Amino acid sequence: MEWILAAGGLIILILAGDSLVKGAVNLALRLGVPALILSLTIVAFGTSAPELLISVQSILDGFPGLALGNVVGSNTANVLLVLGIPALLAVIHTSESDVRASYLQMLAASVLFIVLCFFGPLNWISGLILLAGLAAMLVDAVLKARRSPAPPEVEGADPSMAWGKIILFLVIGLIGLPIGSELLIRGATVIAQDFGLSDSVIGLTLVAVGTSLPELATTVMAALRRQADVALGNVVGSNLFNILGIMGIATLVGPVPVDDQFLTFDLWVMLGAALLMIPLVFMGRNLTRVWGVGLTAAYAVYVWSIL
C-alpha cells in the first residue's frame, strides 16, 4: 500500500506542478506581465513546485532529513541520471551550447550550500543567505536577458487560453500539489521504516529520483531534438533553484539538521557530480553514449553505496 501511496503522490505532484505552471503563465499573460519576468520567475518556480512542496511538508511533518535528502539527491540525479540516460539514446552536442556563466553560478551555490551545512543545522539565517543568492542570480539573469535581442520563449504560454481553463489549471495545481506531497511523504516514510532506512536515505533515492522525472523527460526530448542548450540549461537551472530557492524557503519553515552522512559523503558526491560537467561546459566535449554509460553507472554505484 505504501508503494501505491508514494507512486500516486508522485504522479499527482508532476501533473499538478505542470497544471500550475500553465495556469500561472497564462494568468500572468492576461494581466500583462512581460514574458521575461514569466520565464525567470513563474515558470522556474512552478517547475520546482513538487520539490518545494515535498521539502516544506516533510519539515512540517517532522522529517527534515527527507527535505535535505530530496535536494542533495535531486542535484546528484540531475547530473548523473538526467544527463546520463538521454546520452544513451542520442549524442547531445554540448559543444554547441554556452552555459558557462550559469554553470559557475551553480558551482558557487553548491559550495555555499556545503559551507552552510558544515555550520548546521540549517536555519532561517541559512535560508536568508540562500535566498539572497537566488535574488542576485535573478537580477543577473534579467540584465542578461535585456541585452539579448530575442525574447524568451515561455513554457505553457497560450495567449488565447480561455479564463475558465486558466482557473481550472490553477485550481488543479493548488489542490493537487499539497495532496501529492502528503501522499508521497507518507508512502516514503513507511517504506523507509519497513526497510530500516532513514528518511534521509529515502529522500536521497526514491523521492529525489521521483521529483527529477520531469527534468529527465525534458532532457530526453532535448537530446532527441538536438537542443543541447535546453538539456544542459535544464540541469543547471534546476540545481540552482533546488539549492537557493527550495532550501532557502524550506529552512524558513523550520530547522534542518545535517547528518554526518551528508557531511562526509553525500554533499561531496553532489559536488563531484557537478564537477564532472566541466569537460562538457568548458572543453567542448559532446555528451556521447560513452558518457551516458559512465554517468548512469556512477549513479547506480552511488545508490548501491547508500543503500
Image (spheres, rainbow, N blue to C red):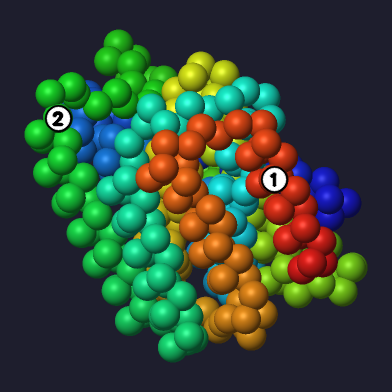
> Considering only vertical position in the picture, is 161 above or below 73?
above
Circle 2 is placed at which residue position? 148
Mark 1 crowdedness (10 Å alpha carbons): few <14, some 14-19, many ≥20: some
Which numbered disc, 2 or 1, marks the residue closer to the eye? 1
**Residue type beneath disc 2:** Ser
Along the line of sight, which residue is nearer the eye, 38 or 291?
A: 291
Along the line of sight, which residue is nearer the eye, 264 or 281?
A: 281
Dots 2, 1 in contact, CB < 8 A: no
Quadrant position of residue 24: top left
Mark 2 crowdedness (10 Å alpha carbons): few <14, some 14-19, many ≥20: few
Q: Residue at x 44, y 88 (%)?
A: 119
**Coordinates of residue 19 in the picture (x, y in percent):** 48, 31
Along the line of sight, which residue is nearer the eye, 111 or 292?
A: 292
**Coordinates of residue 271 in the picture (x, y in percent):** 51, 64
Earlier-in-chain disc, 2 versus 1: 2
Figure quadrant of the C terminus: bottom right
Circle 1 is placed at which residue position? 294
Q: Residue at x 71, y 53 (%)?
A: 298
**Coordinates of residue 193 in the picture (x, y in percent):** 84, 71
> Tag 2's secondary structure?
loop
Indicate left or right for 79 with 186 as reference: left
Quadrant position of residue 288: top right
**Residue type beneath disc 1:** Gly
Quadrant position of residue 16: top right
> Tag 1's secondary structure?
helix
Q: Residue at x 45, y 50 (%)?
A: 278
